[in-house]
Structure formats: structure tokens, C-alpha cells
Amino acid sequence: MPSPSTTARRRRLEYLIDRAELALRTNPGRYRRRLRLLGLLGFGVVFGTLALILALVGGTAAAVVFKPVLVLLLIKSKLAIVLLPLGWVLIRSMGVKFVAPDGLELRRAEHPALFAEIDALRLALAGPPIHRVLLSADLNAAVASVPRLGLFGAYRHTLILGLPLLLSLSPGQARAVLAHEFGHLSSNWARFNARVYRRRARWARIAEALDRAGGLAVAPLRRFFDWYAAHYWAYSFPAARANELEADAAAARLTSGATVAATLVATQLQGDLAAERFWQPLLARADQEPEPGVRPYTDLRRFFAESALDEPQFRQWLDRLLARPTDRTDTHPCLRERLDALGEAARRPGPVTDSAAQAWLGEGLDAILAGFDRRWLAAIGAAWRARHEEFQGARVALTAITAKPAADLTPIDRWNLAMFTERLAPATDPLPLYLDYQALRPDDPDAALAIGRILLERAQPAGLVHLERAAGHRPLVLDACNQAIAYLRRTGDPAAAERWRERAEAHVDLELIARQERAGLRPRDRLLPAQLSDDVRLDLQAQVRALGQFKSVWIVRKAVRVFPESPLYVMVVQLTWFAREDDAQRRLVTQLRCPGETLFVSCKGLNRRLRRQLRAQGERLL
């Protein structure tokens, strides 16, 4: 029975989420009971399977003790060989590994103001103790709970505060963020959702382990958990989302609804502003500067203090934020839903004259910023220099092209002229240059993608026609679909966006089938002539001779159903008596320049049927 498509699985999950959300709205108590029962079903199947395995193996072993002749039956049936590994897979999968969070640890003695805020909010919400406080490089905040005793709990709670977040918020706004995070830990819903989260991770882990295990004995359990893990994830999704709204409500009780509303707007607004107006221009400096002579986090402090928007600008950015819908893959509701749940309008956040970072980290802030600057520079240095070298090479190439008479430009010159102009000369419109190239190469899908992208960025729907052409080329399908989906969602055409999304999902399914089909050579595969040109054949022969270690080398083509226009070559090798197989395989993979996607197979791994096809269809290179 074939697996359901990506689109079918997504629609099934969306249907289950819709049903669960309706159940939570109409009868929260019954929803929670059903979710508990659904969780117990998974434990029942796991522990029931383990009990059955122990009973079968233990009972058979006991029978052998009383009737030794049954030992032959035990060995012949391979019962222990089949069942015991299955039990081991289940036992290992039940323990979900939680990775301890990473960041700069803040000490109570060094930052008393911060810890005073933490203590006051924790006591107000009757929450559990916070064992560690870490400072991260993200514009975010979170509480991570890591079990010290595995399945038996004893959780250690870590509060993670993003340094950019503290730089972008006032102390009052940051207090609302802390209250939200503690709200996740304090309520009944929070404790309930913590169990749900761990179970979601556990069932997904078991499903993955069973998929890797393979074998007929595992097949029934694998089918069950493939269904169950997805079903539990979807049905528990509204519980996780409800916890976010309850944490907002807890923050509003401790501060005010107006403060929480302003903070929600501020966090999303400052994140978008920093990405577009700070980080993008900063990284673009690599085009001109060979070394990253910047202090990003020190400069970010000044950016947030000076990045106030006037009223028209704020309204423009706010409209963008409020237009974002809730994502089905994200347990955080969209901004509009969170504001509606609070009963508050979107409020403009005030200027950040004294940030929470300054108020809570005090005199140590400058040293902390310097440390984050050093770590960022150490991490980004190589990528910065590579971007600079690439940019300078593009500039040299553009200068050489523009020095040529227009009549002497080749199609490749015209493509590079359009591409380099778009990157290096933002004041020049690249669209006419791409259109000039397309007039010479009307079937080039890369040109269609570039033209379609530019037209949609300019709100011209004619770009969709060009994306249709680009999507006919396998490597560009997902890029073209994503460009079209983003445009159609911006312009309010969800039905058309859904059609492009289904097209992308269908392509993902085909790619998965193609990877499975091209993963190796199977006994019933059909082999075809390689159909190499004389130049390619001679080049391969020279390469193979230079490698040595091979007694004979043949090349054929494997017949594939998916993407037959992309050939899959199979190179069958027979080693000399002194060659090491692993070394020869490594040299083939790393040193041989092949005409396309190629499998390397030892002659010893072929059955009689494949050997006959190889002799009939193959070309001998050595």
C-alpha cells in the first residue's frame, strides 16, 4: 500500500488540528481527558508489547528448561533474535534526550537587579525555582526544563534571555516577557503541557527508531506509531497553543494588558527592524571591507536606542505584523490572535531610552557586549572573507564585460552582466538586462526564475508566467513555488497559493521516491547502455587508468521511473588482488569526475541476472 502524499498528510493533520481546536473551545475538560487517554494509549501499546515479548521469550526459555528438546525449536524459530531487538528499540526510545541549553551564565552576585526581578515574578506566580540564567545571542526568551533523572523527572529549569531582546525592550516590557515565561511553568495548563511536550517528543522518537529498525516483526508496530505519532502531535497542538495564551494572561495579571500588548508589538517589530535595517546592512559591508571590523552587539545597543519610527512608519510596519496569519507548524498564535485574546488593541511601544539590559545587567553590560562581539567575529570571520573575495571577483568580471562592445557580448556575457549588475549596481534596473539575455536564450529556466522574481517583487502578476516556465526545470521547482506562494499570500489569493503549495509538495514526494530509487542497485533492476559521447568515454578511461587498483571497470545506466531525463550511471568495478576495497571506493567517489549522478558497485555484488545485463548493455572502460 503506497504511502500518502505530503499534501494528503498535511491536510489530514490540519483536519485533526481543526477538530481538536473545536473540542478545546466547546468542552476544555473533555478535550484534556481525551488527550490524556490518547497519551495512555501510546504507553499501553509500548508496555503491552514489552510484556508480550517478555512472556513469549521467558515462557519459551522456561519450557526449554523442562523439555530440553525444545531448544531446537527456540533456535530454529529465531524467536529471541526477532523479539529481543524489538524490545531494546522500545526501551531505548522511551528515554527522550534533552540537550542542556547553552549561553553565558549570569550569576546572582554579579547581577542582583536581574535576579530580584526573577525572584519577585516567580513568587508572584508560585512557580518552581530557576536553577540557571543564561544570556543568548537571540532576540528571544525561553525556559528550558531538563530532567536530571530521565523518565523519573526532577527537572532543572533554565531561564534563557536573549541579549538583543534585553537591549530592545524597556524594563517594564522585559518584565512582561519574564512573566510570560514564568506563566509557562506555574499554571495547571503549563504542567499539563509539559507532559504533552515530552510525550510528543517520545512518540516521534519511537516512530523514527522503528522506521530505522526494519524487519517484518517491527512492521505492525511501525505502522501503528507512524499513525499514532502524527495523530497525537495534531490533537495536542491546540493545548500547546492555549498555553501561550494563558502565559500572556498571566503576564497581564502581573503587569497590565496594555503593557503586554505593547511588549508583543515591540518584540516582533524590533526583530523585523533589526533584521532589515541592522543585520542586513552590516553583513553587506563584507562586499567592501576585507575584514569584519565591526562590534555588532555594541552597535546593536545604539541601534535600538535610536531606531524610533514616526507614526506613519509605525503604522506601515504594524500592518505587516498584523497581516501575518497563524502558522500551523508554530504553537505561537499570530500577533492579532494574541492581542484579541488579551482584549487589547495594538499599542505603539515607547522609546527605549534605558533598556532592560542596562537596568538589569548594570556595570557589567559593557564587558558582556564586548564578549558577544568577540564570539561573533570569531564565528563569522571566514564567511565574511569568502563573501568579500566573491564580491571582488564579481566586480572584476563586471568591469571586463562592460568594457566590451555590446555587439561582442556572448549569451554568457549577457547573463553575467544581468546577474552582476543586480548585485553590484543596485541603482541600475537589472530587468532589461535579463530580458535581453532571455531573448537570446528563451528556454533558459534560470532567466525565467530571475525575471519572475523581479516582476513579483514589483507587484506585477505577469511574473507568475515566468515562474511557471522555471518550475518546469527540476532544480528550480521549489524556488519558483516559494516565490509564487509568497506573492499570492501577500496579494490575498490563498486558493492560488494553495495550488502552488500542492505543486511543491508533489515535487518533494517525487524527490523522495527518486532518492530511494537511486540509493543502490537491486537484484530486479534493469540496466541500459550508458550512451556516452566519445569524448566523455575517453576522459573516463584516462581517469580510471590513472587511479589504478582496478582489474576491470564497466559503465551502464540504471533504468529509473522518476526524472528519467537525469541519468543514473552505474560503474561496476573489479579490483586487483592487492587493492583494498574501502580505499578504492573512497578514491572513486572523491577523485573521479563522472558525467552525472553515478553509483559505484563491486562486481562481487551482482547477481547472475545483473551480470548478464552488464555484459549485454555495458561499456568497458578498463
Image (cartoon, grey):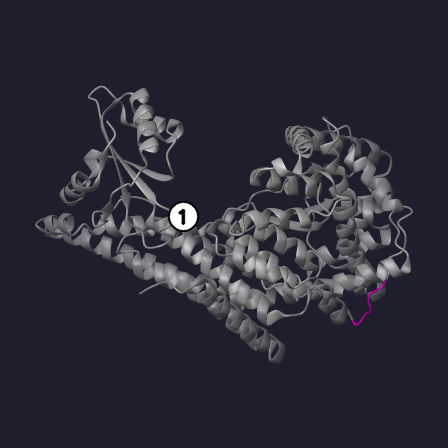
Q: Is residue 361 magenta?
A: no
Q: Residue furthest front?
A: 407
| 354 w.r.t. 544: above or below | below
Give, as a three-letter code, the residue at label 1: Arg
Q: How many marks?
A: 1
Residue 179 lies, in percent from the top left, at 76, 57
Task: Depth check: give the residue in front, 232 or 156.
Answer: 232
x, y percent for residue 99: 56, 43
The residue pinned by badge 1 equals 92
Can you give x and y, in whole percent of width and height, for residue 341 in the image?
74, 71
In which quadrant will I find the C terminus?
A: top left
Residue at 75 percent across and 34 percent down: it is 285
Left or right: 255, with 443 as reference point: right
Query: Quick check: 111 left or right of 157?
Result: right
Query: Where, by quadrant of the figure, is residue 580 drawn?
Result: top left
Magenta span: 343-347
Indicate the position of residue 397 as horizontal and vertical percent values.
Answer: 64, 31
Determine whether 4 is above or below 523 in the image. below
Q: In which quadrant is the N terminus drawn?
A: bottom left
Q: Main secondary structure of the magenta part?
A: loop
